[in-house]
């Protein structure tokens, strides 16, 4: 029985989270293996020939052919900032809103630039955004990011679904931060 694409995406992101957890805890040999794997994934972002460092990890999860480049990108982004935020439909817009709360309105300009990027330049800009989030230790929901990037970097990158992703990011960025409830 074959697994659905959504299940494979979920398994892939869980494997990324497992690498992060393994690099931080467990037996020393396992920590070393996980750190080495994360280093390979980070190097996959270095240039056009570099993704081969991540092929074994990504292709083990059987990404659909149309999504392979996106999965490779997300693996590299994760390794750049392996501070995951478990799935909770936290879009990249929400992460950038949290960054804006720490850094101020200068983040708004970067966010506007992100929304305006064409498909060809989006991966480069995403690398910069993730590094910026990493510098302030703002978590990223990589499962949601993978789902969104499949749309934004896919065949219909100018279509209705891509527009909805951008609108969700914008709504999450510009809406007020949730206020924690206090219970007596």
Image: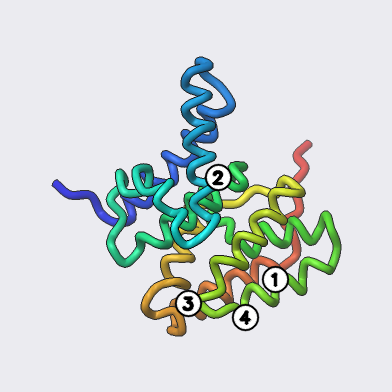
Residue 65's place in the image compared with 134, above or below, is below
Q: Which numbered disc flags the more N-terminal residue, 3 or 1?
A: 1
Q: Is residue 102 left or right of residue 122?
A: right
| Observer-nearest of 137 and 118 | 118
| Observer-nearest of 168 and 106 | 106
Residue 155 % position (x, y): 36, 78
Q: Which numbered disc flags the more N-terminal residue, 2 or 4?
A: 2
Q: Which numbered disc flags the more N-terminal residue, 3 or 4?
A: 4
Residue named by callout 4? 116
Residue named by callout 1? 111
Query: How far apart are the two marked residues, 3 and 4, measured between alpha carbons?
Result: 12 Å
Residue 67's place in the image compared with 138, above or below, is below
Instruction: Say which residue appears at 48% left-offset and 57% top-offset.
Output: 73
- Numbered mark located on residue 162 in the image: 3
Query: How far apart are the two marked residues, 2 and 1, measured between alpha carbons?
Result: 22 Å
* Colour convention of the picture: rainbow
Q: Residues within 10 Å of mark 1 (few under 14, many from 20)?
A: some
Residue 169 appears in which quarter of the rendering? bottom right
Q: Which numbered disc flags the more N-terminal residue, 2 or 1?
A: 2
């Amino acid at each position: 029985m074959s697994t659905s694409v959504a299940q494979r995406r979920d398994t892939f992101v869980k494997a990324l989270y497992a690498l992060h957890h393994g690099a931080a805890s467990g037996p020393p040999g396992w920590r070393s293996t996980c750190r080495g794997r994360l280093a390979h994934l980070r190097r996959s972002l270095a240039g056009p020939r570099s993704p081969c460092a991540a092929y074994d990890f990504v292709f083990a999860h059987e990404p659909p052919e149309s999504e392979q480049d996106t999965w490779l990108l997300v693996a590299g982004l994760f390794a750049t900032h392996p501070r995951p935020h478990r799935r909770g439909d936290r879009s990249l817009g929400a992460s950038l809103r949290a960054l804006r709360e720490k850094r101020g309105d200068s983040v708004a300009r970067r966010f506007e630039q992100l929304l305006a990027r064409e498909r060809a330049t989006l991966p480069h800009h995403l690398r910069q955004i993730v590094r910026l989030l990493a510098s302030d230790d703002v978590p990223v929901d990589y499962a949601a990011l993978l789902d969104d990037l499949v749309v934004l970097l896919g065949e219909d990158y100018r279509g209705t679904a891509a527009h909805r992703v951008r609108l969700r990011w914008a709504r999450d960025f510009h809406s007020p931060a949730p206020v924690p409830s206090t219970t007596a």
